Amino acid sequence: MAEAAEAQPQQGKVAQFMQRKNIEISFQRYAIDALSAMAQGLFASLLIGTIFNTIGNLSGVQAFNDVGGFASAMAGPAMACAIGYALKCPPLVLFSLITVGSAANSAGGAGGPLAVLVVAIIAAELGKAVSKETKVDILVTPAVTIGLGCALAMLAGPWIGAIATAIGNFIMWATELQPFLMGIVVSVVVGMALTLPISSAAICAALGLTGLAGGAALAGCCAQMVGFAVISFRDNGWGGIISQGIGTSMLQMGNIMRKPAIWIAPTVAAAVGGPVATCLFHMTQNGPAIASGMGTCGLVGPIGLYAGWVADGVSIGAFEWLGMALVCVVIPAVVSWGVALLLRRAGVIADGDMKLD
């Protein structure tokens, strides 16, 4: 009994310390906030670098390729800093994560983004724990954050990267083996992840999802974004077309919680678009893996698809452009509109169900 009584004050002190340091061990903080921030860091480095490189390749202006190279090289630091920002790190910890991100991304190899996610979260929380606890904070905080973060990156980074790569390779292998079935599964799952308050882009990047599976993932994301943009036109007009079609379908999450049936039409469109991409057009998204999970957001998905064609030396003709148009825009729009029309006539959904605030 006495030991239990002593343990309670100790637990209380730990809880108070965690609260004071803003260290919150939760699914929301790590799997949603940090993961979503990581995707933004990737967008602000590797993705934008790819776009600059594509412009450089098309225009022949070397300066664009130079900028693209600089941006892409900063993927690890950008992801780690974004994660630290999401975890509300104090400045010294946030800046120290630049080094940690570079180390983790390098050690993780092809699975670098997942290594950065895990290592940066641990390093950030350790840094927050010691921040401003000593009179020599300017030395202690970066030493702990960088020292322990880089040590973890070197020890665990290769293993984390290998696991991520193995999972990604398995999904891509399965999609090659069963393009119809896996085309549906990958398209629907990744598309739904895009609409949920988690990051489909970060998931695709962490798993290195490219190739045929990347094409299916792209189809699913486009189905959600374009689908919701089209079927909610009555409620949101052209503003909704833009905000969802080239923004994000995540805007509909509140409406989905109130009426899940509105999610049926875009999800059916994803189930149709996925196998069309994998079986009919053999669409391989071999640009950056993050582009597989971006859909039509900022047109990043189609740009990534095109960048992959260029990198692979594909002879781009009418068949490729037709596939892109059908998978990214036409099928999501037509199938979603048709299914939604049936649902409206059946009284399952109604005007106002998808109104955005």
Image (spheres, helix red, strand yellow):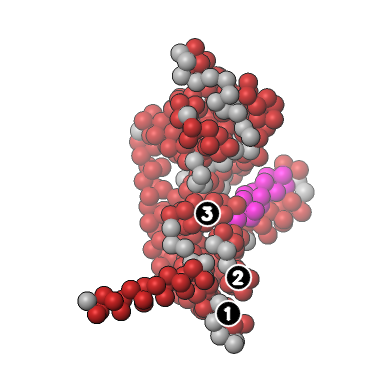
Q: CA distance from mark 2 to mark 1?
A: 9 Å
Which numbered disc flags the more N-terminal residue, 1 or 3? 3
Q: Which residue is mark 2?
A: 90
Tell me which amino acid carries mark 2: Pro
Residue 22 location (% of width, % of height): 52, 67
Tell me what residue is drawn at x 53 percent, y 37 percent.
Answer: 254
Q: Which residue is mark 3?
A: 33
Q: Which residue is mark 1?
A: 132
Which numbered disc flags the more N-terminal residue, 2 or 3? 3
Residue 215 location (% of width, % of height): 50, 36
Tell me what residue is drawn at x 44 percent, y 33 percent.
Answer: 188
Q: Are marks 1 and 3 in contact (CB under 8 Å)?
A: no
Provide the secondary structure element on which disc 2 rests. loop
Q: Residues within 10 Å of mark 1 (few under 14, many from 20)?
A: some
Q: Nearer the viewer, residue 2 or 199?
A: 2
**Picture quadrant where residue 80 is located:** bottom right
Quarter of the figure that contains the N terminus: bottom left
Q: Which residues are magenta?
A: 41-57
Q: CA distance from mark 1 to mark 3?
A: 24 Å
Which numbered disc flags the more N-terminal residue, 2 or 1? 2
Provide the secondary structure element on which disc 1 rests. loop
Tell me which amino acid carries mark 3: Asp
Q: Nearer the viewer, residue 164 or 91?
A: 91
Q: Residues within 10 Å of mark 3 (few under 14, many from 20)?
A: some
Q: Nearer the viewer, residue 176 or 312?
A: 176
Provide the secondary structure element on which disc 3 rests. helix
Q: Main secondary structure of the magenta part?
A: helix
Q: Are marks 2 and 1 in contact (CB under 8 Å)?
A: yes
Residue 168 appears left or right of 229? left
Quarter of the figure that contains the C terminus: top right
Q: Determine if the magenta segment contains residue 61.
A: no
